Amino acid sequence: MQDVDRRDFLKLAGVAGVTFTAGLFAGRPVSAQAADFHFVQFSDTHWGYSGAANPDAEHTLEKAVATVNGLAQQPDFIVFTGDLTHTTDDAKERRARMKRFREIVSALRVKDVRFMPGEHDASLDKGEAFKEFFGATHYTFDHKGVHFIALDNVSDPAAKLGDEQLAWLAADLKQRKPDDQIIVLTHRPLFDLKPDWDWTTADGAKAIELLMPYSNVVVLYGHIHQENHHMTGHIAHHAAKSLIFPLPAPGSQPKRTPLPYDAAMPGLGTRDVTVAQKVSLVELPVTKS
Amino acid sequence: MYRRTMVALLIGSAVGGAVRLRAAEQPVEIKISAKKFEYHPDKVTVKVGQPVILVLTSEDRIHDFKMPDFGIRTDIVPGQETRVSLTPDKVGTFSFHCDVFCGDGHEDMEGTLVVEA
């Protein structure tokens, strides 16, 4: 199915929200034999959160799982770009939240699921509990000719990738051809979106510098609880909505406090990502009650 | 008379300049303590051009003091003073926040530096 056809189908099915239609890879010819496929990105589910910003917090994740399970064209795989759980100082409670989160998402029809940590999961114990439940915090995988790189910019509480991970990234990229299709997954933005709101990665510029020689790179991330689209040179960065509460647009209000709760949850959702010669995004609001 | 007035003016100017220079060189110490999830005080007011030393301490765990508008980022470690020199060169209100994730409430750990003319 062509990506445009899939977007039309999702709209007809009453599932799709706003479609981001721009070609997100640089659009240059690629030598890799990238097949048409799609996957779904969940982000910032914050299981365990309790508060006025989302009185429905106990059910929102389950609704999102049902929404994605209702897609007629099931994705090839699913990625979670961090903050699976809401943070707690209690290590036992942290594990209980991860356990319950894992139980909920085990209902996904698609069983190829990749997890990444956010600072709420990993910054208080340097990723120890996350690794127990979900495995490595940074890794790569390949799917139908596209190379995926999951970066961990949260296990260090100072929001650093660190020299060791950057060296690992450099070594991985050396194995790539300049026009390979590469999708980078992170939790925090790699660029300085709004440093005074902590929307940055301390050494993210070093990662971007390593990625710059590659002509077809897209970065998908979370953390900021809203859509955001930004270019650093030819590299596109796309933030995803959360499944707990939306945050204000960068700099739109004095503090980064959650937006007021709206029972229709227009600011929450997941995202369908279609990959062909370019990448297309379709936002999937939470629709299942 | 004219000569005496000029000398007096020159002396006055020199003395005044020296006073202003001493004032500009004398840094003001401002103590800020950090704990989950607040700074105390969380609002600090200074004069533009006035050298300041921020004396930062933590009451519980490692926090951080980050003020991007002035390129400041430093950890605050319990049991020791962290001193940061700053001479604000612009008027305005500038935010600072904790840059080391410290728990549920970390996102609210912030304050403001007000620089007056």
Image (cartoon, rainbow, N blue to C red):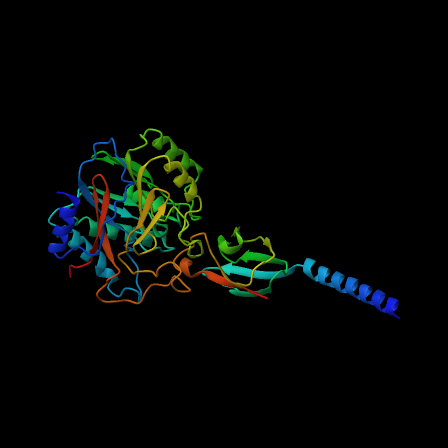
Q: Is residue A237 above or below residue A86?
A: above
Q: Residue at x 17, y 59 (%)?
A: A287
A235 vs B38, left or right, is: left
Q: Residue at x 49, y 62 (%)?
A: B111
Q: Position of residue A253 (x, y in %)?
A: 39, 64
**Which image quarter: residue A148?**
top left
Residue nearest the viewer, comparing A200 with B5: B5
Q: Position of residue A107 (x, y in %)?
A: 16, 50
Q: Quadrant of the C terminus of chain B?
A: bottom right
Q: Is residue A151 above or below residue A287?
A: above
Q: Is residue A166 visible?
A: yes
Q: Residue furthest bottom?
A: B1
B97 vs A138, left or right, is: right
Q: Residue furthest front?
A: B2
Residue nearest the viewer, comparing B13 with B2: B2
Q: Position of residue A15 (x, y in %)?
A: 15, 56
